[in-house]
Image (tube, rainbow, N blue to C red):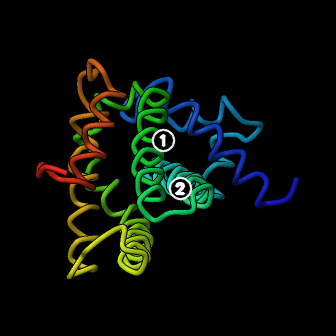
Amino acid sequence: MNKDDIRDNIIDAASKAFSKFGYKKTTLDDIAAFTNVSKTGLYYYFKNKEEVFNEVIRREAAKMQEELIDAINQETRPIDKMFAYIRKRMSYLANISNYYSSLRYDLHEHLHSIKKNRKEFDIIELKVLSALLHEGNKTGDFSVDDIEHTAKTLLLVLISLEIPLFGGSEVEDYEKTLEKLVNLCLYGITPR
């Protein structure tokens, strides 16, 4: 196994350990137990547990980005692409929230670390949202006068819903809540 494969194996193991024990309770020994690498060997690849955690977050962001692009590419109209984007984004986060349910209790403590790691992904999301809004303006699906500001506002709304929807108590009817969110974001509350 080469260095990259071992590093990937460690990140996979860390993901399993964090999902099982939460961030606080997970130790490097726990991560090592899910791999063929000793605790000492882990230090060859990562300085500490936080660095491994950051890599788990980066990997999840990359997977999410791939799934978002796939969802968008399955649609043709910009309005449908936007619906697909928001639905896939929120459902992906719901799925990983369930997977990492033990991290919920640690979530508020690690928001700073998560925010720092997601800046790069936020930039990518803004580009995607801006492109969708621009395309929608061209086709007449949207009528947006300030694409950049609207993209930032949409992203802010989506980010602000992550903790209430996925970091706390269960939402009673998640699918219905998501559908209302998508309609509110794209149609507002004015009559159609």
Residue 129, how many percent across, how many down? 38, 69
> Which of the labelled discs sits on residue 157, or is there none?
none
Q: Name the one closer to the observer, 98 or 3.
A: 98
In this image, 135 relative to 60: left or right? left
118 lies above or below 120: above
In this image, 192 relative to 113: left or right? left
In this image, 122 relative to 157: left or right? right
Residue at the outermost top position: 172
Residue 54, how many percent across, how many down? 46, 54
| Label 2 or label 1, whichever comes before in sequence order | 2
184 lies above or below 95: below
Kindly report the distance in space between the C-alpha atoms of the residues bearing marks 2 and 1: 9 Å
42 lies above or below 144: above
User: Label 1: how many residues lie within 10 Å, few (<14), some (14-19) or many (20+)?
Assistant: some
Residue 185, how many percent across, how many down? 24, 53
Q: Residue at x 44, y 38 (%)?
A: 91
> Which of the labelled discs sits on residue 68, or is there none?
2
Q: Name the one closer to the observer, 20 or 60.
A: 60
In this figure, which residue is indicated by the disc labeled 1? 92
Query: Disc 2 on helix, strand or loop?
Result: helix
- Quadrant hosting residue 82: bottom left
Is residue 126 shown to the viewer in this render? Answer: no
Q: Residue at x 66, y 29 (%)?
A: 33
- Amino acid type, callout 2: Leu
